[in-house]
Image (cartoon, helix red, strand yellow):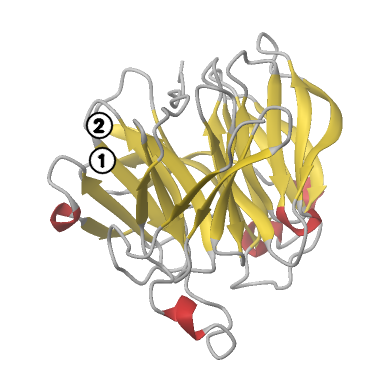
Amino acid sequence: MAEMQRWTVTEPYIKMSCGLGEAPYYESSRHTLRFVDIVKEKLHIVDLNKGPSSLESFDLGTPVSTTADIEGSDDEIIVGAKHGYAIMNRNTKKLEYIKKVWEERDGLGKDERMRFNDGVVDHEGRYWASTMNDPKVKAPPTDEGVLFRLDPDMTLHRMIEKVSIPNGICFSPDAKIMYFIDSPTSNVFKFEYDRKTGDISNREVFYHVEGDAVPDGMTIDVNGCLWIAICGGGKVLKVSPEAKVVGEILLPYARMITCPAFAEEDLFITSAEEEEPDKYPDSVKYGGSLFKVHVGVNGLGVHNFKRR
């Protein structure tokens, strides 16, 4: 049996106060990391060649929760925003919706009480992104959430419905498996994935998180191991393709861990502010900060949205 890997991170890479830091995204061509604060409606970008002092922050004026690059475009990125998929100009940070997701059949008010939450682009350039109740409008969340898939030809597909807080999405290195988290269930689900068609089937529980803390965002490395943020647990778990915990990153001063992302062999980890400061005063210290840990393995890498 392989030895359990353990890391402890006691200092943040950047000390900050994100209300809900999320969606770390490494852009290898620029060697930059960008991430969002959904609650405070901000985009943060750091040049990893220059380090923490290079951090730039931008007000977006709307909650953005997931971002991706666009194949062949240097001036724009695609994001999941309040009402749907939007194009963001890199220079002005202005957004223009290209696909709003709610229809008349969804009933009145759904476009206001929902927002996007997490997303990833698959091997064929399709953008999978999920929606949940916007806590600013309706809390606690219901099962109104949907995992959408936007194809390069701009057709929109509802892939999973009746989810509550849909979170991390990953595809295996061989592009045969899709992993997906619905946080309140504490489950990481596993689907068979058809790369050619984008269809998913045969849903089953891959890994269940015990206790009160829940799985949030996740990423995957070149060996097919999942790195799962445990929100409320102050850690990231490394889970093998056989569903065994083989590594653990402990973050004792930030309990609300939200999402990890690889930048070569470094793992960057976002967090949120502590929800129960009186009960967990230690977590107040660095809750909402960005963390970095060298883990000695490369991430699988990201894909670009292939807009036609």
Q: Element under label 1?
A: loop
Contact between marks 2 and 1 (CB within 8 A): the answer is yes
Residue on which the image places disc 2: 75
Across and down, in percent, residue 305 comes to 46, 24
Q: Which residue is drawn at 63% across and 72% down?
A: 137
Q: Which residue is drawn at 30% across and 54% down?
A: 44
Q: Which of 185 and 283 is in front in this view?
A: 283
Q: Which residue is drawn at 56% across and 18% down?
A: 153
Q: Element under label 2?
A: loop
Look at label 2 and name its amino acid: Asp
Above or below for 110 versus 293: below
Q: Which of marks 2 and 1 is nearer the N terminus?
A: 2
Look at label 1 and name its amino acid: Arg
Q: Residue at x 35, y 50 (%)?
A: 292
Q: Which residue lies furthest to the bottom in this view?
A: 278
Above or below for 141 versus 99: below
Q: Nearer the viewer, residue 264 or 303?
A: 264
Q: Quadrant of residue 55?
A: bottom left
Residue on which the image places disc 1: 90
Across and down, in percent, residue 175 comes to 63, 15
Q: Nearer the viewer, residue 270 or 87?
A: 270
Q: Nearer the viewer, residue 42 or 238?
A: 238
Image quarter where the N terminus lies is top right
Density class for disc 1 (Cα within 10 Å; few <14, some 14-19, many ≥20) is few
Across and down, in percent, residue 307 comes to 45, 20
Above or below for 245 versus 249: above
